[in-house]
Image: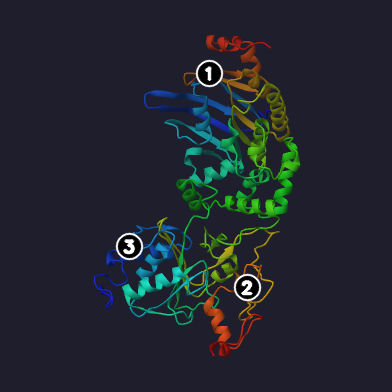
């Protein structure tokens, strides 16, 4: 189904050629068949630097169809550089409809967040992953980490958590918090805050992870058990915030700290911009926000 | 201490390993009883370490077999075990004390984490309990328990070696392989370490395969001794008998070349 995007002649639909997409789709199918297992794939050079989401972009390009609606977020926001440039990339090369609304999107590519709105069964969430190997900083040898995964020897992962408690009195890891997928593979959920970890469990949407530089794809199929690792006497706890969002007053969302002046002034606002906007349109106002209608005037 | 009525824990049968045309070791036979300490002595290059690696399943022999009596009482050939079984055996029922503690420890992980790793590896998920056990073992190997959160990089050579022993013994193994455990330590530290090992071996009823070139270490720790030369076992027997009344010319040379203090 080779199709050139009308507004970007010379390129195949969604930039990658069909053979490459086939190769990536095969890796994705294998990843879905073995939840949490890192499938090697022949990652391509993309017209962006490593670290900017080359893995996620390739996965998105491979699954995107002409009728899909794409949303791209970076740290929860639709309007930051990474999100804007990847969204424009697919607007140009695939001509697909894009959106900032979580509910309207069929494919959501994300860097470092899971949207606040509950994901649905027809949606696919594509993560950009810098380092797919959760054991990497404990065990530098790739041959050894593969053996550890193959034999499900994950004691090492707990050594890392043990060290955290010994040093800080609690598990200090707040992002890229390791999870056990479908009671088998330990997986690095990419650098999402641990606040988002519970959302991966029993999620209706398909979750795909692409690491371009490391050439790995892995997946969590819909409705899969995902458990954050912990100790019996130091159970996993999602990050909690002491105050609501300053703009929309939400108490259930992940907040970013924004420095507002050089006098130490700061505010905490939702990192998911769409979630925040939706709430403000519904009339919710935080202690530093103003009603949407007034702001428009 | 040596329980001769029980069936042997570890049996080597015609064990041979060749590196091309060179001999690593050739046709080695012996049986190790539970609670017995066997020393393998010989000069550098005599095949001691090759034999140790064969016995501990880290190297595949060209001929022969290593049979081990598992905890369920069944005796199995190590070569028939799957890699998963062999690794499980190695981190539960066995210990391996390296000459250089760096090879046996995680240098970037605290002492407590080092001791706890095996426990977490077999599924212990209770931080408080792991820490208590680690404290207990630090105490047992005479390391101040207040150093539980220090890294081995901050430890002296003797302390590292003792930490390595604690890390290995935490799962109550029945068999420990030791490769020159006192190598590179000064004499007084050696003496303390030997004392500790001797105490632990007696208390826990450990079987030990000890590789050393130091005959004094062999005499202090071992019940029986194998003397190796050029890959062959040239003499074997009770430690006191071999060291006091060596039969082979090479063993006589070895014994007579020890400096009397």
Which residue is at 40% across, 70% downward? A86
Question: Residue B205's quadrant in the figure?
Answer: top right
Which residue is at 51% across, 62% downward? A190
Q: Which one is earlier in the sequence, the residue at label 3 or at label 2?
A: 3
- In this view, which residue lies farthest toward the front? A262
Place of residue B167 in the rendered image (x, y in percent of width and height, measured from the top left)? 65, 40
Which residue is at 49% across, 55% downward? A133
Give the label on residue A26, or none: none
Q: SS of the residue at dot 3? A: helix
Q: Nearer the viewer, residue B108 or B203?
A: B108
The chain carrying label 1 is B
Q: SS of the residue at dot 1? A: loop
Give the label on residue B43, or none: 1
Rendered position, B94 above or below A75: above
Q: Nearer the viewer, residue B193 or B199?
A: B193
Place of residue B51 in the rendered image (x, y in percent of width and height, measured from the top left)? 51, 28
Residue A143 located left or right of residue B8: left
The chain carrying label 3 is A
Residue B46: tell me if it is visible.
yes
Camera-near label (1 vs 2) is 2
Residue A64: tell me if it is visible.
no
């Amino acid at each position: 189904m080779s199709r050139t995007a009308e507004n970007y002649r010379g390129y195949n639909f969604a930039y990658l050629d069909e053979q490459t997409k086939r190769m990536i789709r095969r890796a994705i199918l294998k990843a879905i068949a073995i939840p949490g297992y890192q499938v090697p794939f022949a990652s391509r050079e993309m017209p962006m630097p490593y670290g900017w989401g080359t893995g996620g972009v390739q996965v998105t390009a491979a699954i995107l169809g002409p009728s899909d609606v794409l949303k791209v977020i970076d740290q929860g926001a639709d309007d930051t550089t990474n999100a804007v440039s990847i969204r424009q990339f697919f607007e140009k090369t695939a001509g697909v409809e894009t959106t900032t609304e979580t509910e309207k999107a069929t494919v959501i590519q994300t860097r470092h967040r899971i949207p606040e709105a509950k994901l649905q069964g027809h949606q696919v969430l594509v993560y950009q992953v810098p380092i797919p190997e959760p054991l990497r900083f404990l065990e530098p040898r790739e041959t050894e980490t593969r053996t550890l995964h193959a034999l499900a020897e994950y004691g090492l992962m707990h050594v890392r958590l043990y060290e955290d408690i010994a040093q800080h009195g609690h598990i200090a890891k707040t992002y890229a918090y390791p999870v056990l997928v479908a009671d088998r593979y330990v997986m690095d959920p990419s650098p999402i805050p641990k606040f988002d970890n519970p959302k991966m469990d029993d999620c209706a949407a398909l979750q795909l992870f692409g690491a371009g530089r490391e050439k790995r794809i892995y997946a969590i199929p819909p409705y899969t058990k995902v458990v954050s690792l912990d100790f019996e006497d130091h159970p996993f706890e999602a990050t909690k915030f002491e105050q609501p969002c300053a703009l929309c007053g939400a108490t259930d969302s992940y907040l970013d700290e924004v420095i507002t002046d050089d006098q130490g002034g700061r505010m905490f606002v939702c990192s998911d911009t769409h979630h925040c906007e939706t709430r403000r349109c519904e009339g919710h106002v935080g202690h530093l926000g103003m009603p949407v209608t007034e702001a428009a005037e | 201490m040596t329980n001769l009525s029980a069936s042997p824990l570890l049996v080597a049968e015609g064990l041979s390993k060749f590196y091309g045309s060179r001999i690593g070791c050739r046709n080695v036979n012996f049986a190790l009883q539970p609670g017995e300490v066997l020393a393998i002595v010989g000069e550098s290059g005599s095949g001691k370490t090759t034999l140790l690696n064969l016995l501990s399943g880290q190297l595949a022999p060209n001929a022969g077999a290593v049979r081990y009596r598992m905890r369920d009482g069944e005796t199995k050939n190590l070569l028939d075990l799957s890699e998963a079984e062999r690794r499980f055996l190695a981190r539960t029922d066995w210990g391996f004390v390296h000459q250089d503690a760096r090879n046996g420890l995680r240098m970037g992980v605290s002492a407590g984490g080092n001791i706890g790793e095996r426990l977490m590896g077999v599924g212990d998920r209770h931080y408080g309990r792991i820490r208590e056990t680690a404290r207990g073992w630090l105490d047992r190997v005479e390391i101040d328990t207040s150093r539980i959160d220090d890294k081995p990089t901050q430890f002296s050579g003797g302390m590292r070696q003792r930490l390595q022993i604690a890390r290995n013994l935490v799962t109550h193994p029945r068999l420990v392989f030791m490769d020159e455990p006192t190598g590179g330590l000064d004499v007084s530290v050696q003496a303390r370490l030997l004392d500790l090992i001797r105490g632990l071996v007696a208390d826990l009823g450990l079987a030990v395969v000890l590789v050393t070139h130091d005959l004094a270490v062999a005499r202090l720790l071992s019940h029986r001794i194998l003397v190796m030369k050029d890959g062959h076992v040239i003499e074997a027997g009770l430690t006191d008998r071999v060291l006091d009344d060596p039969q082979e010319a090479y063993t006589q040379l070895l014994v007579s070349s020890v400096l009397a203090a």
